[in-house]
Image (spheres, grey):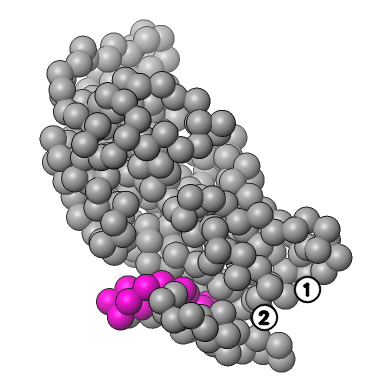
Amino acid sequence: MRAALVTRFGDPSVLVTTDVPDPVPGPGEVLIDVAYTDTIFVETQIRSGWGREFFPVTPPYVPGGGVSGVVAALGPEVPAEWLGRRVTSFVTGGYAERAVAPVPALTVVPDALDLLPAAALVHDGVTSTGLIELTAVTETDRVLVLGASGGMGTLLVQLAHARGARVVGVARGARKLALVRELGADAAVDADDPDWPALARHALGGPDGSADVVLDGVGGEPGARAFPLTADGGRFSAHGAPTGAFSTPDADRAAARGITLLGIADVRFARADLARLTASALTEAAKGGLRPVVGEVFPLEEAARAHAAVEERRLVGKVLLRG
């Protein structure tokens, strides 16, 4: 089968499509004919050699952790009813035409949902749904979303809006800001404006212009500038690092203000929670209540171009690979 292989750490050119042996499902596993593979920013960072203390991988390796597709073969002890089912799953080596997954990792895709948006929800649907639960967003909250036009940010905007919160999204450029508003944000602030924190405070409103919940999918300096906007007793989630580093708010300062800090470890869910959150995201999308935004779909042979597009941030929403 064809797979995209990271041959060494480096720029997108190190990602090469080649022939590799077909995977064989073992006991309790299935073989998935991959329709679409999700890509996420951290995969480009790992490919470059960043974050080895968090992600201990060694080239050559096939990246990719989330796919949608059809169950094509069953390993021993797998009920026959799984054959032919449309599913999503977290896998190892998803940038490939086929992948193996254990049955407990599978989530059946609702009939009303295409496999393309299903793939776009494998990672970000789970994380965004889980974050809204962890931060307990309600209709009385004011929510600030950094990176609001990205794959996860667009979902967070929709989910917070659906709970009745006042939502302010931070993104770059007119096209992305328009999308953020279209998805339900009450206001959108341009991150290219040097005074964006002041603009965000004005848009958040309330007596002090603070946010009850800050969802930081960007990290670095933007995250550091967003932390002071958090209300006393609020919640601050530092779950993204496309800037190259996660936000690291001062824990003592946060505690003194009663702010709950959440980080990347808090969105590494147990398998039971993964299944529940995935099913929830897929069900909402099938009902039309959640719209994953897909910027472009690249063929597997162009995985390097897909990574370049992710890194350049020139697309709005998700970048997917077609198996």
Which stretch appears magenta? 167-177
Q: Residue at x 64, y 45 (%)?
A: 266
Q: Position of residue 116 (x, y in %)?
A: 24, 48
Q: Residue at x 41, y 9 (%)?
A: 27
Viewer can see residue 279: no
Q: Which mark is residue 112?
A: none
Q: As shown in the figure, which amino acid type bears the numbered disc 2?
A: Ser
Extreme residue toward the right, this view: 256
Q: Position of residue 292 (x, y in %)?
A: 33, 59
Q: As shown in the figure, which amino acid type bears the numbered disc 1?
A: Asp
Residue 65 drawn above or below residue 197? above
Question: Callout 2: helix, strand or loop?
Answer: loop
Pointers 2 and 1 in contact (C-beta within 8 Å) = yes
Question: Callout 1: helix, strand or loop?
Answer: strand
Asked if the magenta segment contains residue 173, the reply would be yes
Q: Which residue is mark 2?
A: 210
Horizontal side of residue 307 vs 221, given as left or right: left
Residue 248 drawn above or below residue 46? below
Q: Residue at x 29, y 64 (%)?
A: 316
Quarter where residue 21 is shown: top left
Q: Position of residue 253 (x, y in %)?
A: 81, 63
Q: Residue at x 56, y 31 (%)?
A: 53
Asked if the magenta segment contains residue 12, the reply would be no
Horizontal side of residue 77 vs 253, given as left or right: left
Which quadrant would the N terminus be assigned to in this image? top left
Q: Which residue is mark 1?
A: 232
